[in-house]
Image: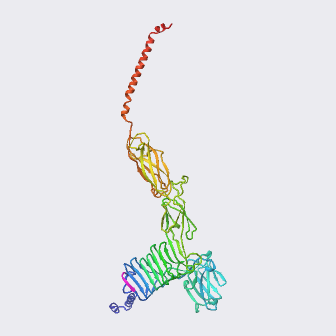
Amino acid sequence: MAFCRDGLAMNRRNPIILCLVLLFSVTLIPSNAVAEGDDIIIESNMTWSEDMTLSQNVRVVNGGILNIVESEFTIEEGVEIFVDENSILGIDNSSLISSTPPGELVGYGYCDQGNRSGVKIEWPSSSSALVTMTSIEPTTFDGVTAYFENHSEALSGQEYSLEIENVPDGEIWIDLVGPLCHPPSISSISVKRANGGDFDCPSCIYATNAADFEFRNMMVYGSPGFTITSEGEFVSSHSNIFGGQISSSSNIHINDSLLNRVGPILLTSDDARIHLGGSTQFANSTDDHDIRARAHSSIIWGEDVSGSGGLTDKWERRISGQSLSFDAMFVTYDITGMHKFPSYSNFSNEMGVSFIDGGRDRVVEIAWSEDNTWEENPIWSEQAIVTISDYRTAWNPEESGIGDYGGGQFELVWDSEVKVESGTPMAIWDSLSVVGEDGALSEAVVGDSVNVDAEISNSGSAAAKLAITCEDVSTDATAQISPSFPYAVIGPGEKVTISFSWRVSVPGEDSISCRILTPTQLVDELAFGGGQTTSQSVNWTMVDDEDGFTIIPALIALAIAASAGGYFLFSIYNEREEDPDEEYQRIP
């Protein structure tokens, strides 16, 4: 306070204002909290037990504990109370009241008379009433019809006034039906005398948030006045929370508390848990359900807990970004049994992935309202069925007689990624051997064909018609085999031997290496197995040279004999040519 006394010697106005600001800030921030920038940081065990207006964000971190006990907090617009994973926020016999709660109204989109959206206007005066309504921007009342008593009137524009001549019993319901059952919306309502004048009567009401009137079959609409975001523990007991939003990825325990214009409470992870006990009550949730959970979040709803009722359900479970993952691209499938979709079809992309409904949020469970009269069971849970309609690859073309891969039908579970692995083959090499009459062959003659046996197993759950291709290991050149692409059909759990012939043109040590040809439709070429293996080494030889030399002497002898015989015949011929008379003399 010395600072303030020194300031009196100067210009009195500025120091006094500064002192007041400092004093006000001291009353605003509890003495056991630390202000860091624009936030109040709680890192120890603290208790706030005085009424206050909270205009700064509060962060409970690093194992801190904040208890709000027997007090009323007015929380200004946009304030966030954050609790980290190691910390706790507790509210006991207290109230957290938003200074700017959501206050507009939106219908559910029903047209039947029993479920029309409506607001009640109280007008105890005998004079005519002028009820003026404005719609939520940017919507209008174009195409909306108002029903009151035995009258109906078409509305239009951003603002519309209804003149009601007679208000029996001092109150009247105005029901609204949007075009083609589109939900109507109301931002504000004012009421005054229809014969002119200002809002100068006891029953007159200046333009007021529509949610401050009594309404039916409508939801409160608007941004939350404040937020409680918890990654740790949030506990509320015998307390009142009005106009804020609660979200948690961890644990929430709420007992004997009123949650007005708070729902839906958001459970943002599959690990999040909420326990509602005692006489906890929801009222006026800002959607058609009081809790919005992830697919595997834990929800415990006590017997004496009350929901908003009417057309607002207790909870919805949702899944976001769900996909089917296939080993192949362009696999088509159908899904039946989903919420809002009698049937849904899609196909896998180049990565083998297909996002269900584009990955958008999808409702998989609904706990119906306590006022439910339209559903037989209190909880609906999705039991969707996926049917593979086209899963063809080079291993199961239609002419092969092998059916579609993928297992035919299966139940769609609530996992973010569902891998479709059933009903597919898995080809595995057992052996590759060059064989002869007595077993494995180690030597062969260049130019001769030898037999090769390729043994392949199918450990999968579907048959495959597959082929192989081979190379000479020594040259990496395509092997000379027959047939060029040996193939076989292998059933699930079976082993086959594919036999073919192989020959080489160059002498020396060599092996044959063979690879299973996999379908080009696969995202990963080894998704159905396959791979490459190599046979034992074979020594390829030319014909033995010593065997060739044994033929030469025989050829020489044959040539000499031929020459001698020729010479003998030639000599006889010459003798006959030289003594012709002698020949004739022998003739009688």
- Quadrant housing residue 311: bottom right
Depth check, front residue: 404 or 443: 443
413 versus 235 height, above or below: above
558 versus 424 height, above or below: above
The majority secondary structure of the magenta stretch comes to: strand
The reply to whether residue 56 is visible in this rendering is no
Tally of numbered discs: 0
Toward the front, the furthest residue is 438
In the rendered image, residue 46 lying in the magenta stretch gets the answer: yes
Q: Position of residue 435 (x, y in %)?
A: 42, 44
Q: Position of residue 369 (x, y in %)?
A: 55, 78
The reply to whether residue 521 is visible in this rendering is yes
- Quadrant housing residue 36: bottom left
Q: Position of residue 415 (x, y in %)?
A: 48, 68
75 versus 422 height, above or below: below
Q: Position of residue 353 (x, y in %)?
A: 49, 63
- Quadrant housing residue 559: top left
Q: Which residues are magenta?
A: 43-47
Q: Quadrant of the N terminus?
A: bottom left
In the rendered image, residue 303 lying in the magenta stretch gets the answer: no
Toward the right, the furthest residue is 150
Depth check, front residue: 497 or 380: 497
Colour convention: rainbow
Residue beneath the point at 64% across and 86% down: 164
